[in-house]
Image: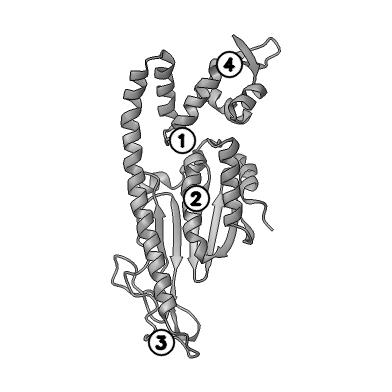
Amino acid sequence: MTSMRISQLAERSGVPATTLRFYESAGLLSADRTPAGYRMYGEDAVDRLAFIGAAKHLGLALEEIGELVGVWEAGACRDVKAGLRPRISARLAEAEVRATELAAFTASLRGALAHLDALPDRAGRCDPECGFLSPGVGARSVSGSVSARAAVSGPGPVPRPGSSAPGSGAVSGGARRAQPVDVVLPPGRRAAGEEAERWRSAPVTCSLSGDGLRERTARWREAVAGAARAAVPEGLRLTLPVDRVTRIVGLAAAEQECCPFFDFRLHLDGPHLHLEVRAPADGGALLTDLFGPTD
C-alpha cells in the first residue's frame, strides 16, 4: 500500500529527495502519483533503497544495480547471490590493483622525503653534490582519472621516466627544474582517454548519507583546514602543505567511489600540494558544501 511521500521516504531511508528523483529517472525506483501529482511510495521502497545503497557501496555501476534490482525483486536469494558474486570479484581485483599502485606511490613519496631530510643544510648554492632526487626516485606514471603531477626542482637535469633526455626547464641561479611527472590512481582498467572526462557525464548524486556523509565531510574539512583557496574553471584550487598528500589522495579515491562527478587533480610543488577539485555545473553547490567557497 502506498503511504509515503518523497519527504517521508527520504527521512526513513536517509536518502536525499534529489537522489530519490534521480533513481526514479534511472529506473531504479518507481512511484505512484496522487491526483495532484505528488509521488507516493510503498513500504517496499525502503528495502529497495537499502539494497541499492549496499550495491553502490560495493562499487557497482547503476546499470548493474538496475539488473540486480530486478533479480532481487523476484525474491530468489540464490539468484541475487549468483549475480553479485562475479561483480564483487571484479571490483575486488580492481581494488587490489589500485591499492598496489597507491602503496607504490606512497612509498616513493616517503623515500623522496627521507632522502631530502638526510641532505645537510648548507648556506651555499645547490650543486650536483646535493643529489636531491636521482632518476628513478619518486612517482611513476600509470593511467586513470585521479592524477597527481609532481614537479621536483633540483641542482641538475632529471630524466623523465622512460626517457633518456634530461629536463631542460631553467630556474634562477643556474639550477634546473625537472619535467613534471604524471602520477595517476586509476579507478579501474578502462583506457585513460575514456576515463579522463568521465566526471562530466557522471550523475550528480552521492551514495553516502546520514552518518557516512557527515563523517566524510568532517574528514575533508580537517584535511584541507588552513588551505589557501582560489577559483579555477568549474571548481577551486586549494594549496596545502605537501605532508598531507597521502591523506588527500586516500580521500580523493574514496570520494570518487561515492561521488564520481568530482574531478581531482594534484600538483606537488616542493613544500606545497596544490589540489584542484572540479564538478559539473549542477554539482557546484555540492562542491561548495564539501570544500567551502573560494576566498
The span from disc 4 to disc 1 (Cα, nearest Å) is 24 Å
What is the CA distance from the residue labelled 1 to the residue labelled 3? 51 Å
Q: Look at the image and tell me whether residue 234 can be seen.
A: no
Nearer to us of marks 4 and 1 is: 1
Q: Earlier in the sequence, mark 2 or mark 4?
A: 4
Dot 2 amino acid type: Ala
Does residue 246 appear left or right of residue 241 in this picture? left
Mark 1 lies on residue: 57
Whole-Å distance between the Cαs marked 3 and 2?
A: 37 Å
- Residue appearing at x 40%, y 78% in the figure: 132
Q: Mark 1 belongs to which amino acid? A: His
- Residue wearing tag 4: 31
Look at the picture and state if 140 lies above or below 71. below
Given residues 15 and 195, the one toward you in this image is 15
Foreground label between 3 and 2: 2
Quarter of the image with the N terminus is: top right
The answer to which quarter of the image holds residue 275 is bottom right
- Residue count near mark 1 (Cα–Cα under 10 Å), binned few <14, some 14–19, many ≥20: few
